[in-house]
Amino acid sequence: MQVKVSIGISSRHLHLTKETYELLFDEELTKKRDLNQIGQFAANQTVTIKTEKGMFENVRIVGPFRSYNQIEISHSDALKLGIEPPVRRSGDVQDGAVVTVVTKKGEVTLPNCIIANRHVHMNPKKAEELGVVNKDILTLALEGEKSGVIDVEVTVTDNGYFEVHLDTDDANAFILHNGSEGTLNI
């Protein structure tokens, strides 16, 4: 079976616990705009992430708060920072690369930096319709000037909006934009 799916491009960003956020800010976390994943939003608040070799300013926080801290970057970002974060499924931050998160209020060093694995979000109803389960690996065909086929991991959540998430390196390699389409082979 083949199914068309839209593609969302994930720039570097981070998810924080309420406790970590409060070490970095004296204000409430506020919404800039909703994201396609139901209940998630890009916050108005940004931070600087740094290592001894490099830094990125204005890195967006994605809300709401989570039960773990997670910094997501691309491989190109990792090269600039001089670190080697593992490629992982979201939430699997054990033994991640170490970065320091900085705001005007203070800074926190976190061992939770990863390169997020390519994945396709969906809710349980969509997963059942497609005959897939959480953590299945599917192939995604990408067409255009630089076509190709890549693997994506299924992520099933109650609030999952049917969409593939790729980082900026993958998007640039295939000349993709937010809203581009691919074809899942199931």
Image: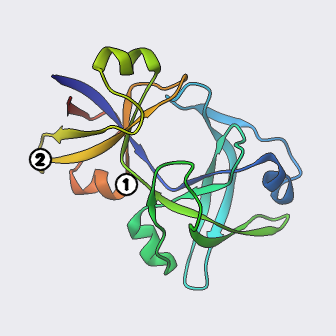
Q: Is residue 89 left or right of residue 27?
A: left
Along the line of sight, the residue nearer the viewer: 65 or 81: 65
Question: Which residue reaches farthest bottom?
Answer: 52
Q: Residues within 10 Å of mark 2 (few under 14, many from 20)?
A: few
Q: What residue is pinned by disc 1?
A: 168
- Residue 147 disc label: 2
How far across and down, in percent of the image, does residue 159 sit?
54, 23
How far across and down, in percent of the image, does residue 44 sit?
69, 43
Element on which disc 2 rests: loop
Q: Residues within 10 Å of mark 1 (few under 14, many from 20)?
A: many
Amino acid residing under circle 2? Ser
Judge whether 130 appears above or below 14 on screen. above
Q: Residue at x 86, y 46 (%)?
A: 27
On the rendered image, what quadrant is the N terminus found in?
A: top left
Judge whether 162 appears above or below 100 on screen. above
Q: Are marks 2 and 1 in contact (CB under 8 Å)?
A: no
Amino acid residing under circle 1? Thr
The quadrant holding residue 51 is bottom right
Along the line of sight, the residue nearer the viewer: 131 or 40: 131
- Residue 144 disc label: none
Q: Earlier in the sequence, mark 2 or mark 1?
A: 2
Along the line of sight, the residue nearer the viewer: 162 or 137: 137
- Describe the colour scheme in one phrase: rainbow
Judge whether 57 appears above or below 173 on screen. below
Total labels drawn? 2
Question: Which residue reaches farthest right?
Answer: 26
The quadrant holding residue 152 is top left
